[in-house]
Amino acid sequence: MELMKDQIQENLKEVRRKADEACRRAGRDPQEVTLLAVSKTKPIEDIRTAMELGQHAFGENYVQEIRDKYEALGDQVEWHMIGHLQRNKVKYIVDKVRMIHSVDTIELAQQIEKEAAKRNVDIDVLMEVNIAQEESKWGFTAEEAPEAAKQIGTLPHVHLHGLMTSAPITDNAETNRVYFRGLRQLAEKIGAENYPNVVMDTLSMGMTADYEVAIEEGATIVRVGTAIFGARNYSK
Ligand SMILES: *Cc1c(COP(=O)(O)O)cnc(C)c1O
């Protein structure tokens, strides 16, 4: 299932082209949108292949994988933690990642604060919101989110920069437009509260199936794996 180098580079160019077109359709500056290449389960070689084309931000879901890849590449690229994070594993990544997208409880935010304070580092985070209210998904509900944002804002080493969501799996990206719009509106609502140490300038939403629609609805980070690196093989 591993793709050839040329194929990955073609894919990356194509995703960038489509992202730029979505920006144009929405009257947005392509500079406002960061393409996060989701490299989970993929080898370092694939990351290097994307780096050759100037790709500098990579998304990972698993703590052990971030540790291994960080050991190989360090701060040559930005690492973003996008997967569910257990509290007892925060210590392994808090000083390695550029941003944690998947803060889904206050307790996790407090643990991040504790580990960041120990190392005297600041860390940018997003709150994961289960905007489509799916049973299977992590994240705050839209109703809980404003109060949670306020509480996270009280943590001095943790800087809340916005919201993240994973929309439902679908064949028709248009059906997720309502969720992306909902996340943007929720961020606007929280931003208007002007809670101390809370900035709502980042919306992490849109994956392979729906990143163009997400950009049209205001995504500032899209998280794209399969369309760049090919299908993942979890059986290895
Ligand atoms: C795996 C993953 C992605 C990338 O998904 P693709 O469909 O391969 O683009 C994005 N976000 C999260 C949270 C993921 O776990």
Image (tube, grey):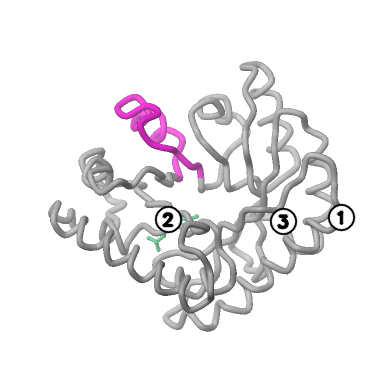
Please name the residue shown 14% across and 51% down the image.
Answer: 5
Q: Amino acid at mark 3?
A: Phe
Secondary structure at numbered mark 1: loop
Q: In the rendered structure, does residue 36 fall within the stretch colored magenta?
A: no
Secondary structure at numbered mark 3: loop
Answer with the quarter of the image where residue 76 lies: top left
Q: Position of residue 217 (x, y in %)?
A: 58, 72
- Ligand 1: image quarter: bottom left
Q: Which residue is mark 3?
A: 140
Q: Observer-nearest residue: 97 or 188? A: 188
Q: Amino acid at mark 1?
A: Glu
Q: Earlier in the sequence, mark 2 or mark 1?
A: 2
User: Circles 2 and 1: CB distance less than 8 Å?
Assistant: no
Secondary structure at numbered mark 2: strand
User: Circles 3 and 2: CB distance less than 8 Å?
Assistant: no
Please name the residue shown 41% across and 34% down the image.
Answer: 66
Crowdedness of circle 3 by 10 Å Cα count: few (<14), some, many (20+)? many
Question: In the rendered view, does 118 fall on the left or right side of 84?
Answer: right
Please name the residue shown 59% across and 60% down the image.
Answer: 165
Question: In the rendered view, does 155 fall on the left or right side of 26?
Answer: right
Crowdedness of circle 2 by 10 Å Cα count: few (<14), some, many (20+)? many
Q: Which residue is mark 2?
A: 35
Q: How far apart are labels 1 and 3 at the CA level?
A: 18 Å
- The boundaries of the magenta stretch are 61-81
Q: Position of residue 168 (x, y in %)?
A: 53, 71
Q: In the rendered structure, does residue 62 fall within the stretch colored magenta?
A: yes
